[in-house]
Structures are given as C-alpha cells and as structure tokens.
Image (spheres, rainbow, N blue to C red):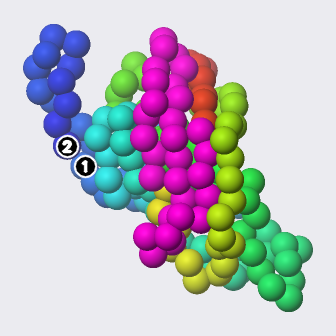
Amino acid sequence: MTKADESGTMTEGPSLPLDITKLMQYLPHRYPFLLIDRIVTMDADRYVVGVKNVTFNEPQFMGHFPGAPVMPGVLLIEGMAQTAGAACIASGEAGGGAKLVYFMTIDKCKFRKPVTPGDRVEYHLTRLSRRRNMWWYKGEAKVDGQLMAEAELSAMIVTQ
C-alpha cells in the first residue's frame, strides 16, 4: 500500500493482510482481549476492514450463554475499536513513537443479529473525522455480508 508523506512523496505502507503478529505490534491487547485476527483491507486511516474468527472455545461463551452461545455485543464494539486503532497506528497517520489508543465514545449503537461461534466477523470502519490526536469512525460488524451491529466510535491516540 502506498501513501503520501508530509512532502507529498509516495511511500510504502504496511503490506496487507496484517496478521496477528503484526497487529500485536500496533495494539497492546492480548488474549483473551485481542478481538481481531487480521486486517485485510486498509486505505491509510480512512477505511479499514478487520476480521475476527469466532470460535466456541473463547472464554465468553462459558457464561454468555452456555446453552446458546452468543458473542457479547460489547465485544463486537471493542473489535470495531481495535480495528480502527490498529489502522491509525499502522497507517502512520498518528505519527511516530509508541502509542496507546483510548476509546472515548460510542454513539448510535445498534445490535441487529446475534454473532455465534463459527462466524467470521468483518469489522468495516470508515473515518468520519479527525482532529489532532482524536479520530471518529462509523463501524459495522458484518457476517457473510449481513449487518450484525453498528456504531459510531471515537478514540484518542497518545504517545506512551
């Protein structure tokens, strides 16, 4: 992927897909709270698609709900936020240095259909706005093209 640096010169960005090893370089999250497995599409920090493969052996399914496992909606929203945060860091748009992404707001959140073990969730994030170290995104969680959840999110990126 190419992008323009501050002088307008085209430079090479991260090659796609970004696998779990690369994501762990961009995000501080680890098992069981790293909720994306890879990034498959990215246009700098403007648009990104992350993927989560939902499996029955994840810890949330022990209690949510044992007889009818459903991915908690709050984890779908967290997966959207992690996808956006990883894109901001990976794109280089957040500047250099070690970074942390702090989740700030969730607006217009709706859960449409349940996500269950065996599903492959795609997190589609589109940047709405950016001001200094703050980003706003519209996110959609989809399974097989069907909308499962949506929200508008904001985050702040800080240097450690």
Q: Main secondary structure of the magenta part?
A: strand
Alpha carbon of mark 2 to alpha carbon of mark 1: how far?
A: 6 Å
Residue 72, position as x, y percentages in the image? 76, 64
- Mark number for residue 15? 1
**Left or right of 43: which side holds 20?**
right
Between 123 and 8, the one lying in front of the other is: 123
Q: Could you tell me if the residues under marks 2 and 1 are in contact, i.e. CB atoms within 8 Å? A: yes
Amino acid type at image mark 2: Met
In the image, residue 107 above or below residue 93: below
Report the amino acid beneath label 1.
Answer: Ser
Residue 156 badge: none
Q: Residue at x 53, y 29 (%)?
A: 136
* Residue receiving disc 2: 1
Q: Which residues are magenta?
A: 124-152
Q: Residue at x 46, y 24 (%)?
A: 129
Pick whichever, 25 or 79, lies toward us. Answer: 79
* Relative horizontal placement of residue 7, taking residue 17 as reference (left or right): left
Residue at point 54%, 59% (across, down) = 141
Is residue 21 something that shows in the picture? no
What residue appears at the point 48 percent right and 14 percent down from the top-left corner? 131
